Amino acid sequence: MKNLIFIIIIFLNISYANSQNKGIDQDKIKEDLNEIITDISQNYVYLKEKNIGLNCIKEYYGNEIKNIKTEEETVLFFEYLLDEFYDNHLTLRTNRNSSYRLFAPIYTTIENNKPIITNVWQTQIENLNQDIIGAEIIKFNGIDFEQVIKEFPTHCNDKSSQEVKEWIANKILAGRCNEPRLLSLKLPNNEEIEFDLDHLKLKDTNELLTSKLISNIGIIRINNSLGNDNLVDEFDKTLNSLSSTKGLIIDLRNTIFGGDSYEARGIMSRFISKPKPYQRHSYLAKSQNNPNIERSWVEYVSPRLKQYKNPVVILVGRWTGSMGEGLAIGFEGMERAKIVGSEMRRLAGEVYDFGFKNQNYGYKLSTAKLFHINGTIREAYIPTNYIKQTTTKKDEVLEKGIQLINKITE
């Protein structure tokens, strides 16, 4: 009887393993690996700056194919490959339970080789009861944070580089979807606390935008809707209702996923009386065995409907992403608004979709660089009115925006 049970257990284990392997063709994965490497080499506009050896990518990931047994492992295989380039704009167009999220509601900067929490998404968090600005991250899920960075599943980038290390540190804070995110922190007063990132609750903002009045200053907050065409009509109605205000604040601190230039141009078009340039595009045109030639052009916005002519301030932060970043530099490039806040999400370049031959999902690559009209590359832009977040007890960015409008209209 014991032998029979043992045989049944072995049979079930074999059946489970076979079910996991079903549909996994390692030759097809190799074919897709070659395809994504080719696409990166030919189309990724930041390849030279990243200084990642494609030979390392090809060798390491080529050797890993033999270990792939499941569909989920296949997804992670390509996810980790894109992570080698420490670029939040390079993403796989799918995810699994063990995938890393795209962002966290806090941001850490490496200062004196220590990970310090420098930004918290206070305007979007409902239940933030502890001011953790300036705290050092000591451990993640009980493991020394430095060790977690070293064990992050990339192998071809330089984890000793501050830029790479900071990117990885924030990817760790984003965390895997199926794992906890318990931080051990040392506060600026040297008090050590345990902080559970997963206990933070983000506001449920279903409206495309929200608006309010403060001392005759209109405030329009875009609720992560720059990819929804209906936003333009909603913005028109709201702006019309605020036409008599002495100034306007457009809050872009919740545009984490970016959006489309249709929405951005639709918004900017309400603030100018003649066509204005708002950003520059650039990419390298390639010809086999011939020099690469840069191609660049400037994109304009044309005026639309009744213009709002009073002072405008744009609020930005670490969760202002992609087209939100383009909207901010566009307003400044048109000399139509003052920008207030911290560094933005720094999503580099203009992305396009690419597809695998054998997988039913694809990936995004940046194929062109984007610039402020003054020549500053978008991801390096620092707001003219820079605000270093020092506390979560008040909204320092909004306060500065109101102060600027009051000063202009005195």
Image (spheres, rainbow, N blue to C red):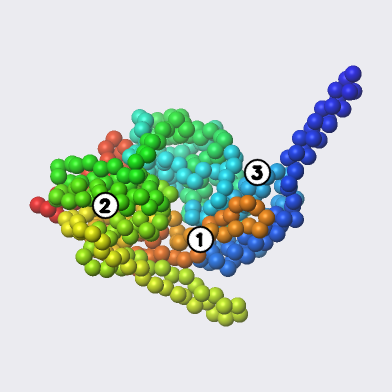
Looking at the rendered structure, which numbered label has been put on residue 352?
1
Image position, residue 129 (x, y; %) = 35, 29
- Residue shown at the point (45%, 59%) measured from the top left: 348
Whether residue 267 can be seen here: yes
Callout 3, which amino acid? Answer: Glu
Relative placement, left or right, of 26 versus 166 is right
Q: Nearer the viewer, mark 2 or mark 3?
A: 2
Disc 2 or 3, which lies upstream in sequence? 3
Relative placement, left or right, of 263 versus 50 is left
In this rendered view, identify the residue nearer to me: 29 or 134: 29
The correct choice, above or below, for 404 with respect to 174 in the image is: below
Outermost residue on the bottom side: it is 290
The correct choice, above or below, for 11 with respect to 34 in the image is: above
Callout 2, which amino acid? Answer: Asp
Which type of secondary structure does the marked residue at label 3 adopt? helix
Image position, residue 325 (x, y; %) = 37, 56
Image position, residue 149 (x, y; %) = 55, 45
In this figure, which residue is indicated by the disc labeled 3? 72
In this figure, which residue is indicated by the disc labeled 2? 236
Outermost residue on the top side: it is 1
Mark 1 → mark 2, Cα distance in angstroms: 29 Å
